Image (cartoon, rainbow, N blue to C red):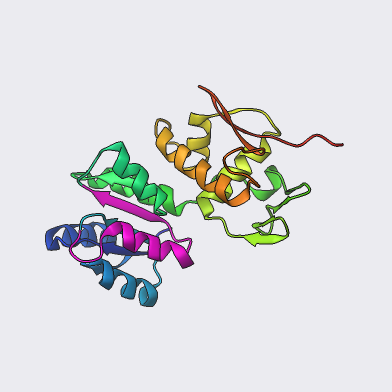
Amino acid sequence: MSGAKILVVDDEPQIRRMMRATLTSNGYQVDEAKTGEEALETFRTFLPDLVLLDLNMPGMGGLEACRSMREGSDVPIIILTVRNAEKEKVEALDAGADDYVSKPFGMQELMARIRAALRRAPGSLQSGPHGFASDDLEIDFDQRRVRVQEKNVRLTPKEFELLRHLVAHGGKPVPHRELLQAVWGPDYGDETDYLRVFINHLRRKIEPDPSRPKYVLTEPWVGYRFAIPEEP
């Protein structure tokens, strides 16, 4: 997606300058912000295709800014932070981030993450399932619509593609690595914490009782599967 608009949010001027130079040289349009508050204002006016968001900033932090952006938008958000503990990763993903890059990072790695976030999941509509329907769940993959107990539910692009890949396998277990590479891209495979967070998001949105899921089931040590209810 050369020409895509990227919002860079970081309180360190040298990092913003470095990222602006690299991104513009790769054909991206760039705007920047140095605080969470400024980021939200620029987000509404610049309308970016992707956000690079630092986690540690004065005032409104990255997590709060991420939650605010995610409330009304499906734009990909990549968190940048010096913290690398799994707890922080899970918090960032749970706040609505699509990906997570630890500082210091190489620009080649960051560019690969950006391309993966901007790229829609592989596979055409024609090659996958067109829909699913049960008593309490309706999915229209062509229209990207989900209804749970007669109410529309909004899924993020990552959540939607994860659900599509599970449904496409018709009740068969899908390994962690396959799900990661199908939804996030070929450079992924070991980030099982990503799956745990996004599976929990899906369950909260589509399951009648998320604590006792009947659709999105865990296959211990393997991955996940979408259970298709048996006909009465």
Q: Look at 25% across and 68% down and name the residue there.
A: 32
Give coordinates of residue 67: x percent, y percent: 39, 60
Q: Is residue 21 magenta?
A: no
Q: Residue furthest top?
A: 221
Which image quarter: residue 186? top left
Q: Look at 48% across and 61% down and name the residue there.
A: 74
Which image quarter: residue 13? bottom left
* Of 3 and 210, the residue lying toward us: 210
Give coordinates of residue 190: x percent, y percent: 40, 30
Q: Is residue 33 left or right of residue 139?
A: left
Q: Look at 53% across and 39% down and name the residue there.
A: 182
Segment colored magenta: 57-81
* Of 40 and 33, the residue lying toward us: 40
Quarter of the figure that contains the N terminus:
bottom left
Q: Look at 32% across and 57% down and name the residue there.
A: 63
Q: Is 109 drawn above or below residue 217 in the view shown?
A: below
Camera sees residue 53: yes
Give coordinates of residue 130: x percent, y percent: 73, 49
